[in-house]
Structure formats: structure tokens, C-alpha cells
Amino acid sequence: MLVGYLQNRFSLPELHRRALSITPCSSLSATTWQYRAYSSTAEPQGTKRYAIIGGGFAGAATAHYLAATASVVRPVTIHLYDIAGLGSGGSGAAGGLLHPFSPKGKVLWQGQQAFETALELIALAEDGAQQLSQQTGTAAEQFVWRQDILRPAADAKQAVGFEALQIHPICNSASAQAISGKQAHVLLPGLNEAALPSPAAGASDSTVAALLIRGGLVLHPYKYLRAVWQQCQAQLAELGNGSEACLRLQQVPSLTQLEEQHGPYDAVVVAAGAAAATLPEVGGSLPLRLCQGYGLELVPKLNAKDGPSVTEKPSMMTVTTSHHQNTNIHANFQHIESDQQATGSDTTSAESIEAMTDTADHADSFPTGAPSLVGATYMGVQGGQQISVGATKQFGVTPEQALQECGRRVTQPGELAQAESLLRPKAEALWSPASAWKVAQVRTGVRALPQNTVDGAVPLAGQLPSTPTDKQWYIVGGLGARGLVYHAWLGKLVAQAVVEGSDACLPTQLRRWKLPDQIKIL
């Protein structure tokens, strides 16, 4: 069990308000490694020291659950290392859609437990952000939108599969239900006819054409990660015993050097996503495929500020001290394909569908109450005034190139135009009014995709085989397109493994990567 988890829910007292800052602990260059050796006199006796490499979904969730093991008599220090800050990799470029269903409408492996754990962490982050807002007298920034998600059938075969599904309720949190094309159009005014499979001759209006997910969420990735991290900092600061969570903007060259320069750590968790294999202790031991993808942020033209058709907004965590060069990996590859996202479904009543009101023109906002979209192209709606569209898919990326992509801003006109030309037509093919929306930003990130096994695309976790006998080195990764579904559950499990000093508590499916002969690849 995680020690003191329920007892340590924080309240953000005035005394510890400064602990909520996410200012980096060090401003040294991300490519230099010139830090003083760790001194035990700087922390209370008996402090548990943890290092996490990677500031994405898995890293932030692991930090949260390790912070939950702290108590008044058990101080905890957490160092979160990332070359460019929170959400600088694949997590920050994610579309932000959350639900527990596969493209076929079935519940993912461990989907129910993972989804419910994610909802719990999201609720904690929301509570923390609200309390911080009250303490500082500032407006709380929304980063969660609860809404239905619609998956149009890609073809008649998938539609038949949807029709054969039983309704899947997930403990009253989410469900999936097959619906007709007519119902889909009522739910989402402006849905393109071509987005749904053509009905067979003589088919009725009730013929299944899509899957509806009730209980889904859309998140703003960076704002969510920031809220989780601030909550982690506040939780430790409230103890008043020297416990702290510190974000260090720097590249970690190796786990051995990390331990020598900043250790000893009681445990190190590698949650570096597609860049994990740049660490020599990880190397080529992970059965992952790396995939770079672009995403667009669309806003209504009527509400967009004057300026070029694509405007780049600097991240709040931009690193100005890093001198690493971001080689454009896209010049090395010729084929960029449409990405397929995993998504799910849910239930609706005929009454609620018929109650939806159509709108003639949606050039200035997304229809109120309408669902986001998933499929070969996704459209994650954030409050009606912003739509996240994605994603392209480019394989053949190396871990070193993935590291170079971290925190990279897409600013070159040619690259901006290429991303828009690939994704805008797909968005318009789904939802016709998208043609009247403006591209405000182009995102890029590299995801680490796991192998597809008999259990589906299962992430990986466990103790690294290269771990010295006197160390605890763990890895969590391969979340792929399902990072939001699995991140909290995996973070909780890895924190439990750290506390117990063994990865035996992890499901065997997460540890099969260490025994390749046991992996059954589909």
C-alpha cells in the first residue's frame, strides 16, 4: 500500500504558497553536467530520495504517488528531470482525449481500473488548482472538459462490429453504444456525410454507423500536467519537514552519472517516453516503435487575433538555458501517414439525442454539448473555442531524434504549411465547419508505441535489467496513444514497486518485455 495516501491530501496553506512554483531548481544548461555532489546535510535524516526522468503523463503521475508515501515522520524528496520541462515530449503533443475503449468498442486491457484511477488523479488536480486559485486570488484555469466522444465507423465492417457490441458501462463512469448515422448527425451538427460509411441499399435510418462514448474527457495536456505537479509540490510542502518536489531542467546522460552527481537515490524511475533509450542503461532493451506526429490547434477565425494563419504561442515552460540543437527529423523521412487513434464508446437515449438542437453555422464556436471525434483523425474539443486535431504518423525516428524534439517549437513556414496541408483536409472531412476555423498552433511530438500482443497494446514497466544490486532503477513506458488512460494507474503501481523494493507487484503483462520469448506478438 501507499503509506499515508489518504492522510496526506493537501490543503495549500498560505505558509507554503511559494512551494507551488514550478520554477526550475537549476538554470544550468541542459547539456552540461556540472553540479555539486549530493550532501546528506541538506535534507532531514531519513529522507527518502526519488528521481524521475521525464515530465510527461507517466512521470508526473509517478511523482504524485511517490509524494503520497510521505508523512510527517517520513520526509520525501522528489527530483523530476526533463530537458525542457513538463509536457515537452509526446505527452504535451497529445490530443487530450480520455476514455477506456479500443477502436472496436471493447474495454481496453485493465481499462476499467486504469480509467477510474485516471479520473481520481484528474479530480485531485482540479481540486488543487481550485484551492490554489482561492489562495492566490486568481481565476482557476480550466483544463478538463467532460463530454461525449463520437467514433464514426471507418467502414461497413466496423459498423457491423459496433452493432454486435453489448453496452459497456464502466462503474457508471463511462459506456459505449452503437448509434445510427441519423443520431450521429443530430448529436454533431455539421458532421460530414462522408465521415460515416455509406448505407447499403435499402438500409433504414436506424442502421448503425458510429459508436458513442459517454463519460469521456478532453484535457489540455500541459495545463493538466502543471496542475498535477503543483499538487505534488503542495502536498509535500504542507508536511513542513523538509519534504519537497523539485523540477530540474536538464538532460540526464546516464543513470550512473545521475547517482554519482546527485545520489544516492532510494529509487530512480525512467519515464522518458521515446527518449528513454538515450540512457545507456536502457539502450535497446525496450520493444518499442517510435512515431513522430503533428497536431493542429484550431480556433474560430472570427475570434482569432490578427496575424499569420499559424501563430505559435510560447510554452510557459520554455527553456532558455538549453543549447542542444533540434535537428529537423522530418527531412530524413519521406512518408507521413494519417495516424489512427484508439478510442471507445458510450450510451445515449433516443430522447436525449432528439433533444439536441441543430445550428446553422459553427464558424465561431463548436456546437454546445456536441461530442469530440476520434478515429483515423481525432478532434478534441476544448470549451467550444479550441479544437485539437491530429495526428500524422511517421515511423523510423531514433531515440536521439526524439530527445531533440522535446520542447521544439514548430516555426518554419514550410513545416507549418506541411502539417496544415496534411491535417486540415481530414478535419474538414469529419466536420465541415472546420474549413472556417484558423490554425493557431502546430504541435509535434514523438510517441513510444508498444508491441501489439494478445492483450492488446500493453505498456511496459518494471525494474531495469541493468540495475546494480544496491540500486532501484525502474522504467515505465510504451504508453503510445493511450497515455492518458494508463498514466495514473501505472504511476501508482510503479510507486508501489518502489516502496516494496520489487517489481513483483506489477502485472506480468507489464513485465513481459524483460522476457521476449514470452511475448506473443500479433
Image (cartoon, helix red, strand yellow):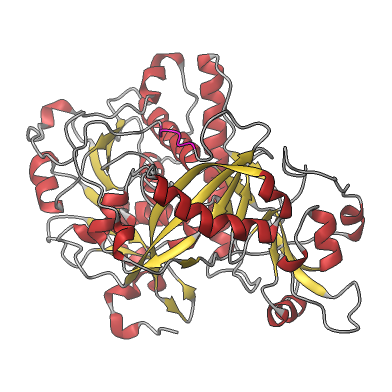
Q: Closer to the camera, 511 or 431?
A: 431
Look at 61% across and 59% down and name the residue there.
425
Question: Of helix, strand and loop, which mostly describes the magenta segment?
Answer: loop
Whether the magenta-drawn stretch holds residue 320 is answered as no
Q: Residue 99: image x %, image y %? A: 61, 58
Residue 378 falls left or right of residue 346: left
Q: Residue 97: image x %, image y %? A: 58, 53
Look at 62% across and 39% down and name the residue there.
299
Is there any visible trace of residue 501 in the rendered image?
A: no
Whether the magenta-drawn stretch holds residue 314 is answered as yes
Look at 52% across and 56% down and name the residue there.
421
Residue 481 falls left or right of residue 75: right
Q: Residue 14: image x %, image y %? A: 45, 14
Is there any visible trace of residue 222 in the rendered image?
A: yes
Q: Relative to 465, is 314 above or below?
A: above
Q: Relative to 216, is 336 above or below?
A: below
Q: Quadrant of the C terminus?
A: bottom left
Q: Which residues are magenta?
A: 311-315
